[in-house]
Image (spheres, grey):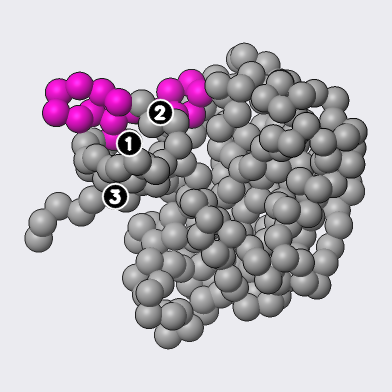
Amino acid sequence: MPGTRFTDIRRFDTLDSTNRYLLEEARNGAPDGVVAVAEHQSAGRGRLGRRWEAPAGANLLLSVLLRPHLPHPHRHLAGVVVALAAGEAAESVAGLRLGLKWPNDLLGEDGRKVAGVLAEGDLSGGTGLPGSPGSPLAPIVVGIGINVNWPAADTDLPPDLMGVATSLRQQAGHPVDRDHLQNALLRALEPRRDDLDTAAGRLRQADEFRSRCTTIGTPVRIELADGEFEGTALDVTAEGHLVVEVEGSTRTVVAGDVIHVRPPA
């Protein structure tokens, strides 16, 4: 993308996973800013190992390789800046103001999911890396899947996604140009990527995420690897972690699955 660091854009008709591809490229020394885009992913995955499937050519399936000077407690912000850039792109291209659900989902005005983000760090210490695993220079690959033109209608969805997923096309009421959306996302990401390298920049991105986070103030159920609990989301920390009130005390969630709990009718 001219005017940004994202000039090495690698396009694939079919790829198992854009994240997996860039993690492998990172181990071989690929630099900050490489982008992988696929028309279709045969093994695309979301958070907690979930599969992410979409018809070929309908949606934007994109990953970026980042090598920020980012302290380990703040590494969650790598996914945050991609989610914020996608929200800015959706607003400029489709005229939609999307909400952000913690940690990194983008939601339409009706609360249905438009996009999901998955950030993965290299933990192998492979060759060609300028930093050891967990160091500020260790690579992070952030993937995003945006429902751009699929589904066109609710009837396109499988039963388990009815009332859960939506698309920019559905929300805007007209088709959305994927190339324009991609370019807008990368332009919006450039200054946000710069912000990851400084304390002031990281705080600026965390503050913006907080202002757009629809999870704050919402009753939630938090599902962790070793159990679950319910409470009310209070805040997002400077590191991008979720603060939840639970029976008069607070818990900070670094990683977990969040369900917005609807009050009884």
Q: Which mark is residue 216?
A: 1
The amino acid beneath tag 2 is Val
Q: Quadrant of residue 253?
A: top left
User: In the rendered view, does 59 fall on the left or right side of 211?
Assistant: right
Query: Residues at badges 2 and 1 in contact (C-beta under 8 Å)?
Result: yes
The amino acid beneath tag 1 is Ile
Q: Does the magenta run of residues contain 241?
A: yes
Q: Main secondary structure of the magenta part?
A: strand
User: In the rendered view, does 143 fall on the left or right side of 257?
Assistant: right
Real-space CA distance between mark 2 and mark 1, rounded to the nearest whole angstrom: 8 Å
Query: Which SS class for mark 3?
Result: strand
Q: Position of residue 168 (x, y in %)?
A: 53, 65
Judging by the rendered image, the residue that carries numbered circle 3 is 260
Task: Mark 2 or mark 1: name the one nearer the start of the chain.
Answer: 1
The amino acid beneath tag 3 is His
Task: Mark 1 or mark 3: name the one nearer the start of the chain.
Answer: 1
Which quadrant is home to the C terminus? bottom left
Q: Position of residue 147 (x, y in %)?
A: 56, 66
Q: Is residue 92 visible?
A: no
What residue is shown at x 39% (from left), y 62% (from top)? 112
Q: Which region shows up in magenta?
A: 233-251
At label 3, counting other C-alpha atoms closer than 10 Å, the crowd grade (few under 14, some 14-19, many 20 or more) is: some
Judging by the rendered image, the residue that carries numbered circle 2 is 236
What residue is shown at x 61% (from left), y 22% (from top)? 72
At label 1, counting other C-alpha atoms closer than 10 Å, the crowd grade (few under 14, some 14-19, many 20 or more) is: many
Label 1 or label 3, whichever lies nearer to me, is 3
Q: Position of residue 83 (x, y in %)?
A: 57, 44
Query: Which SS class for mark 1?
Result: loop
Q: Position of residue 7 (x, y in %)?
A: 88, 46
Residue 61 lies, with reference to residue 66, above or below; the image says below
